[in-house]
Image: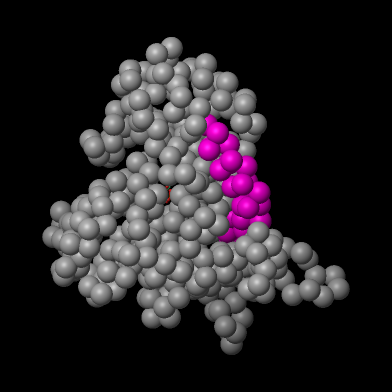
Amino acid sequence: MAEQHLSPATRLVADGRPDRRPGAGLNTAIELSSTYVAGGEVDYARSGNPTWSAFEETLGDLEGGRCLAFASGMGAIAAAGALVGRGSVVVAPRHAYNGTSALLTERANAGDVELRRVDIDDTTAVVAALSGADLLWLESPTNPMLEVADLPALAESARGAGAISVCDNTFATPLLQRPLDAGVDVVVHSVTKFLSGHADVVLGATITRDDDLWQRLHSYRTLHGAIPGPMETWLALRGLRTLDVRLERSCASAAVLADRLAGHPAVIRVRYPGFGAIIGFELAGGRVAAESVEDAVQLWTPATSLGGVESLLERRRRHRLEPSTVPESLIRLSVGIENVDDLWSDLASALPAA
Ligand SMILES: *Cc1c(COP(=O)(O)O)cnc(C)c1O
């Protein structure tokens, strides 16, 4: 692990390397053994892998805790959700990522947990809902409504109520927000997005400072077989190396685009928390206008997912699972690293006249 006094941009590059000795590779190898000669630390590859370890060391250092890589963001989310068992009370954002919402709803419908939905940016309402709760699920900013939660206040209230707090930090990344520093117990990531950054990997992760929670998450991963492939983990680590420069460009462009969208006559609302590379905007022309934007763009790709070098956009309500409180015309932008003026002229030419 790199020295703590080094900046995150440096640690992203320096962490997770093999020991420096003459002839050693700069990169950790892609370790493809399923089993190991008996007597060592790892004996079977479902419980550990050196390529995972290099990735986990790097992301763990960035978030300030111990990391576990999972087969996908949803794999990590399922593991963190399983920290509370049958009969538990779960407080969760109304607009959490739709996979997270579907998983919690499924458990609630099966009578496994009691689910309390809250507006995560309404701190007073969340604190009120925490009475008797076992798990506070946080996501900030939320996908796709971009609501921002007061993490320090909510983590403290969760602790006071005896609830475990989990934060999905996919949108902010540890470069913009460190939930463990805010008092949150567990961070989850869809590594698929910004951390990998090239739309070529599906991967997830959990990070915690609590040894007991880490053990339980590790045990879940091993027993449920929710393990990543070594190749995916290696690609994710390669992507992580450039996170700082990618995010810097994407965030700077997002600020410019949010500003220009706010001044466009066809746009009735821009959702942009003031940081990050994701923007939501709504159109006066409703669903039809939003669909015509998806059809008209040339440089932006109409596609789901986010956080890659390539700019994507999507009308979120095209997903059946998206709640009806998400406006029909809401388009989510994932701002990549292309030239910002090229991005704007393509988008502007696809927007309705007024
Ligand atoms: C994409 C996403 C997930 C799910 O991650 P996968 O890697 O697709 O399983 C979870 N949370 C957020 C905020 C996401 O954007």
| Span highlighted in magenta in the image | 230-257
- Quadrant in the picture for residue 128: bottom left
Q: Position of residue 268 (x, y in %)?
A: 35, 25
| 193 relative position to 248: left or right | left
Q: Position of residue 18 (x, y in %)?
A: 72, 71
| 303 relative position to 26: left or right | left
Q: Position of residue 310 (x, y in %)?
A: 58, 36
> Within the magenta stretch, is there residue 338?
no
Considering the image in quadrants, where does the C terminus appear? Answer: top left
> Within the magenta stretch, is there residue 256?
yes
Residue found at x 22% / y 52% = 118
Between 305 and 124, the one lying in front of the other is: 124
Q: Position of residue 293 (x, y in %)?
A: 44, 20
Between 191 and 29, the one lying in front of the other is: 191
Going by the picture, which residue comes out furthest to the top? 353
Considering the image in quadrants, where does the N terminus appear? Answer: bottom right
Residue found at x 22% / y 58% = 124
| 29 relative position to 333: left or right | right
The answer to whether residue 334 is visible is yes
Q: Main secondary structure of the magenta part?
A: helix
Say if 284 sits above or below 9 in the image. above
Residue found at x 43% / y 44% = 273
The colour scheme applied to this rendered structure is one colour
Residue found at x 37% / y 50% = 148
Going by the picture, which residue comes out furthest to the left? 111
- Quadrant in the picture for residue 168: bottom left
Label count reads 0
The answer to whether residue 218 is visible is no
Say if 323 sits above or below 56 in the image. above
